[in-house]
Amino acid sequence: MAEGIPLKRQTWYSLMVGIVGCGVVLVGLPDLRNTNAWFLVVMLALACLIEAMPVPLRLGSASLTPAVLFSYVALNGREEAMLCAIAAAFVPAVRRHWDLEAVFFNAGQYALSAFAMWWLLHLCAALPMSRIDAYEVGCLVLSAALFLVVNHAFVQILQWLRGTLLWSAVWAALLTDLINLALCIPFALLVVMLHATSAWLAPVMLLPLLMLAYMLRSHRQAMDLQEIHESLAKLATEFDMQEIAFEAAHLARRMTFADCVAVFVIDSRECLVPAAVYPKSYEPEFSFEGWPESEGGVIWKTIHQRDHVIVPDVRKDPRVRFLGETVTFMSMAIFPMHAHQKAHGAIVCYARRPKAFTHVHEYMDALASQVSVLLENAKLYRELQDRSFRDEATGLLNYRYFYEELSRRVRTSLQEHRPVSVLIVDVDFFKRFNDTYGHLAGDVVLREVGRILERHAAPDGIAARYGGEEFAVLVWASANEAYAIGEAIRQDVAKLAVDFEGYHLQGITVSVGMATCPDHSESDRDLLVKADSAMYWGAKQRGRNRTAMYAPEFDTQLFVDPLTSLYTHHFVNIRVRDEMAHGTTCWGVICLDLVHFSEINAVYGFEAGDEVLRQVGVVIRQVLRHSELACRYGGDEIVIIIPNVSDLELSGICRRVTQSLEQHPFRVADQTTSIRVASSIAVYDVVQDGADLFNRIEELFARLHGAVELGESEPSSRS
């Protein structure tokens, strides 16, 4: 009810001013019988044409129409001047929208201002003015000043009734109108001077004013468009949608002097979501959950209409949907954003006062158009970037993104004293599962496991495919909270059942290891290694299908094989992934198999066989360099992995290792024996990830075993 009181007051005031002003003109209409009809028609036409080309300003517009009114007043044409004022007042309504209240008010205050000017000039000088001297010019300037004061008095009383009177806006408008008067008075004097000679030619003096209005209007529009272009040019290389939206909102507010600007974008759910609100203090006024099209509203309708919409008073527009009971903003200007026939959202300007936006669409349409193109480019860039950070098989983030996010979160954890935890999840016996049902079925299982991980990582964690059948989860959680998450993941996977081409796949289990910053480490890489070691030694090696928290006892088992003292397969896997994260894609592989090693175990016993393996490890460590990673791959199998190596270099390393092993005398049960080594080498130029490399190593060992059975040795390949 309280909102309706000022609304009714301003309406009655507007209508009263309009009726009084138009009434005064109607009373004086009989006096127009003796006027020069030609002169009146031409002056009416000029008044309307000049009013149709206002000079756009940020808070409104400036008009040179008073030159016509001043001319008629100086010629003692009171009724004619007021009639021209009323005719000019109707022009904006024709150009934009019909608002009876606004039209009546503008016509009335324009006519009454002209009447006040005539009254003062009539008191000060003889009318019509017949000569141009300093006194009469001074009288005309003084009466024009009264026109200005009366005009602004009517307008500011209306703003006061609305509760939106801003003194800064008053002084800015006064200054603008003073400049207009300085332009209008000389043209009015020219009309008066020529009228004494020829009433038919006098209106010609106002034609340059028409051209001047057009030039000023064009210049102002060019300046506004240039400002938009320069501001948005800085965003040409920006692909952050929120940053683009925020800068667009900031620019739109500067261009329109709106109290608030919101940039709405259409998200993947087809909902309107405010991507930016400026100033940010107004963010509580908006819902960030999204506004679906089914709920309607003036913004959605404007987007489909594809043309801007001005809502002078939201309380009078049934299309407007309010989020709360209290109305904060009284007027809106909506500028839809479209690019390449696709809707992207809208820039919406809000003001706390009614009828705040009447002269902004010329440049705001251009702003919305350019911002829509920037947002579309940002969306495409984000999609491409998202693809580069996504694993195609599971749809999860890949290890590259995971490494970057892990580094960021560890830094934040140390700065804000907020624990962050890493969970490494490995699908148990996945190779056996692939061999039984095929790789396509394996991919389906990995996708389903990935969905479980994403669900448990939400809302602020991430799930990524670490490589092969391994996954990583990064969550803001303490050690105990992360352990509980790991257990929940393990239990949900154990309940998982997947239907694939007639198979009902179940019995899937995972091993989970976790470590927390800062409890277990303050280094991102070390934290990852410790979570990995917890998974391998705490869960995998202790029976699988369990969750393990990092413990220091796992460190001694992580890096070195206890029998051969070579690196563990687990450690080499970590090293390979780390190298790949830094851009290494070319890898050389040497697969070694101790031929007929089972005979040593059979003849001399397993203890003697273990001793031979220890000596094999010593020999290999002696002949390899630091960058050449050797690990025990299986019982009597050794794999050596070298980054960025050529075929020739790899062949030389293989000969060096095999000759050293075959020439070395091994002590077995107080006897000396030798061993024979079968080898297979390959250089892989493009390796996608660690899982890809170890899959190829497995294939290389399979070919080597086949070659050994056929009595061959040292096959090599390049791929």
Image: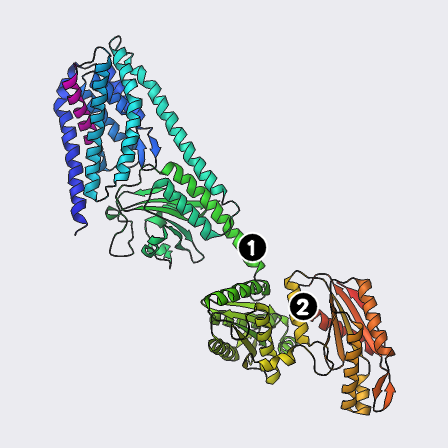
Query: Which of 393 and 413 lies nearest the eye of the viewer?
Result: 413
Q: Pointer 2: residues within 10 angstroms few (<14), some, or many (20+)?
A: many
Q: Is residue 351 magenta?
A: no
Q: Which residue is mark 1?
A: 384
Provide residue 20's location: percent of width, then percent of height: 14, 31
Query: Which of 614 and 321 lies nearest the eye of the viewer?
Result: 614
Residue type (three-letter) at the residue carrying disc 1? Leu
- Looking at the rendered image, the quarter that the C terminus falls into is bottom right
Q: Which residue is mark 2?
A: 576
Provide residue 3's location: percent of width, then percent of height: 19, 50
Provide residue 34's location: percent of width, then percent of height: 16, 14
> Which region shows up in magenta?
107-126
SS for callout 1: helix
In this rendering, the answer to whether 29 lies above or below 603 is above
Q: Does label 2 or label 1 sit earlier along the sequence?
A: 1
SS for callout 2: helix
